[in-house]
Amino acid sequence: MINTKLLAKLCEVAGAPGHENRVRKVVLEEIEPYVDDISVDNMGNVIAVKKGKESKRVMIGAHMDEIGFIVTHIDEKGFVYFHTLGGFDPKTLTAQRVIIHGKKDVTGVMGSKPIHLMNAADRQKVPTTKDYFIDTGLDKKSLEKIVGVGDTITRERKMIEMGDCLNCKSLDNRVSVFILIEVLKQIKTTPPYDIYAVFTVQEEIGIRGANVSSMQINPDFGFGLDTTIAWDTPGSTKQEQVSALGDGACIKVMDSSTVCDYRMVAYMKEVAKKNKIKTQLEILPAGGTDTSGIQRMNPGGSIAGAVSIPTRHIHQVIEMVNKKDVKASIELLKACVEGLDSYNWKF
Ligand SMILES: [Zn+2]
């Protein structure tokens, strides 16, 4: 149904914000035969251009970075202290394996106080990231030969298939990196307008890469590509689920950083209907995406919308998507890009 091997490769490599090198390498290898031009800007954003019939510009952004940590201190026994890069839910860190990217990769575990030693007050308390330390099993002297302050840390988890679903770390947002690569591969005829496929950096800490590329490209049209919440699990209600796994690609209406252009939302709905692509509408009350940079960080703004991928257990080590939604997202984005000149964009 989809190239899960490539998706697994993209998810399993490390890429904390500002340290996307390994992801960038895979992206560059994959897209090279399918685009007319590739450049990497000073921040590390990859900008791939596929020439269209007319010179209008369509920017599509998918962020390469993942939530991670950075080493702040190593104590006298060799335990590692860290600061977060991106929005972690601290309770999900307990007993997780992580990888510290020093001179070489070192595996560590997130340690915290054992339940046996917790008093009644401890047990009531919601943990914070400050309650954790990383234990590598190495003493200070051995560890400091490999690891130092400023080295990044990412989650350790391989991809597995579960029915129609895929489960791995970093599906946020490598699933979108994958979708964008696939769209570049699958567009076989000259698109109406120039496509600027941008694999962005530092989204998880504030949409930093997309802002810079948007300024440079100055797009007429824009699409963000990111995961969204699927709170379709026990304890949720229909009105708060945002999206549901298996119900199709999401057409974003808004998130906390963007109100999508109403013309783009209408256009995307029309494209989905015409091409019989299963979609759902997404309103994400908390959380921003590159869509905001694509829409606004350029003179005059762009007509922008986004394709979002329903994701359960987001920002945890066991993020989950449905292959059918991924396939629908590829089809939707491809059809939307290919038909942009067939719509009346007048207000
Ligand atoms: Zn994301």
Image (spheres, rainbow, N blue to C red):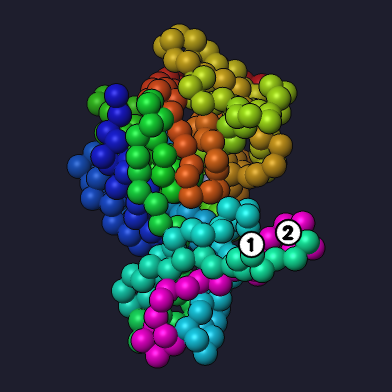
10 Å neighbourhood of mark 1: few (<14), some, or many (≥20)?
A: few
Q: Is residue 228 above or below residue 334?
A: below
Q: If you read the primary sequence from the N terminus, does the residue marked by circle 2 or circle 1 appear first?
A: 1
Name the disc covering residue 123, or none: 2
> For this rendering, which residue is in front, 283 or 160?
160
| Ligand 1 lies under 8 Å from the Cβ of mark 2 | no
- Find the residue positioned furthest to the left: 33
Residue 267 seen from this side: no
Gap between marks 2 and 1 measured at Cα: 8 Å
Q: Is residue 255 left or right of residue 183?
A: right
Percent x, y of residue 339: 42, 20
Segment tinted magenta in the rendering:
121-143
Kindly state the secondary structure of the residue where label 1 is placed: helix
Report the quarter where the N terminus lies. Answer: top left
Percent x, y of residue 110: 52, 65
Contact between labelled residues 1 and 2, with CB atoms less than 8 Å apart: yes
Name which residue lies at 41% across and 44% down.
168
Q: Is residue 306 left or right of residue 140?
A: right
Amino acid on which the number 2 mark rests in the picture: Arg
Residue holding disc 1:
115
Name which residue lies at 28% across and 52% down.
26
Q: Is residue 269 above or below residue 25?
A: above
Name which residue lies at 39% across and 52% down.
157
Tell whether position 134 is magenta. Answer: yes
Residue 319 seen from this side: yes
Name which residue lies at 52% across and 13% down.
270
